[in-house]
Image: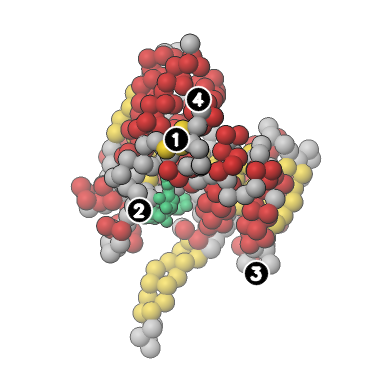
Amino acid sequence: MRKELSLLMLPGDGIGPEIMIEARRVIDWLAENRSLKITVHEDMVGGAAYDAYGKPLSDEALALAKQVDAVLLGAVGGPKWDGVDYDKRPEAGLLTLRKELDLFANLRPAVCFEALVDASSLKPELVSGLDIMIVRELTGGVYFGEPRGIETLENGERRGINTQVYTTSEIHRIAHVAFDLAGKRDGRVTSSEKANVMESGLLWREEVIKVAESYPDITLDHMLADSCAMQLVRAPKQFDVIVTDNLFGDLLSDVAAMLTGSLGMLPSASLGAKGGGALYEPVHGSAPDIAGQGIANPIATILSLAMALRYTYERPEEAQLIEDAVQGVLAGGLRTADIMQPGKAKVSTSVMGDSILRQLDRLNA
Ligand SMILES: NC(=O)C1=CN([C@@H]2O[C@H](COP(=O)(O)OP(=O)(O)OC[C@H]3O[C@@H](n4cnc5c(N)ncnc54)[C@H](O)[C@@H]3O)[C@@H](O)[C@H]2O)C=CC1
Ligand SMILES: CC(C)CC(=O)C(=O)O
Ligand SMILES: [Mg+2]
């Protein structure tokens, strides 16, 4: 018999707690209506944890994250913690979580819901049917490379240092994830780096080519990351799977978000080796500019829960149900402020959550 399913919720900072409430209601709905019982634990991360414990991820929260099947995280950070030492900043809590759980593969799907085709930053014909998977390496590269820090030189100048480092094994394992995913999709991988100016980029390209030899049915091409950003807004439907490093993946996925209408629409899954833990979180941050107003879009977080159902809990039907409910609510004309369009009804975070639950009821009837 399968063991009890478990989840750790880490709402975090800014809009994190507001959007997490709506995801929690979907979990409760699944328990009531689909006999899907997930034991939910809750703890703090980011600035909230720093304020409570003096560090952005407590040892207890980290231990729990390692025990549960999956973590669902809201967002971390905000101006309140701007002066805090680097290793204690809210963002460090999230980086520690990713590293400690060895979640090297960050899947960031950029899917344009048909109802939002007109809300995209691009012309409707460029995004209608858009379905890109960005596979971002998450535990290496310049966010983790040593040496790092800020030092003062003899002449009194200060120097900030970060180091971009990749090893062959790090490149191979993320490339395998991308090729395996492409095999279940349209069979095309675009690898993106800066092989023209960075040795780590050249190594990335050479090693991805080696991995591709085991996938004769997948088409591989290479695109310099600056050009890739441009192509994403020029003709995004040319892409199927994009595999890229930690920094470029961070940037390219925020660009891709605007193709779908808003950062508030983009979910993500961070996965490690099979059988290990997993972290699900919206791509966006803590949005301090709108925090506390009840207007944040909870859809990216609810869709992150759907990804957890698909990748961790092996409940693809429920994942699909949630995605269909989101599509239904959008098709019905409800919009949070970030995806608002003329002639549509602007709703709050909680009304969007309510509406998704009612749509789930209808689809499940
Ligand atoms: N995974 C995480 O926890 C991340 C945390 N951050 C942190 O978040 C803080 C704010 O960073 P920003 O650069 O402002 O990025 P952000 O992603 O928080 O916000 C960028 C813009 O998108 C809007 N936005 C984001 N999510 C939204 C949602 N769900 N609904 C409606 N609008 C939404 C915000 O209002 C803002 O105008 C920083 O401390 C940053 O380090 C940033 C990115 C990821
Ligand atoms: C640690 C995060 C703040 C970095 C980021 O922007 C992201 O992972 O999307
Ligand atoms: Mg980011």
- From what the image shows, is residue 184 above or below residue 58? above
**What whole-number distance in Å separates the C-alpha atoms at marks 3 and 1?**
48 Å
* Nearer to us: label 4 or label 1: 1
Disc assigned to residue 325:
4
- From what the image shows, is residue 260 above or below residue 204? above
The residue under label 2 is 289
Disc assigned to residue 345:
1
Please name the residue shown 54% across and 61% down the image: 165
- From what the image shows, is residue 80 above or below residue 218? below
Q: Is mark 2 within 8 Å of ligand 1?
A: yes
Q: Amino acid at mark 1?
A: Ala
Other-residue count near label 3 (Cα within 10 Å), few / some / many at <14 / 14–19 / ≥20: few
Residue 161 in the image, given as x and y percentages of width and height:
45, 70
Tell me the quarter of the image containing the N terminus: top left
The residue under label 3 is 197
Residue 238 in the image, given as x and y percentages of width and height:
72, 46
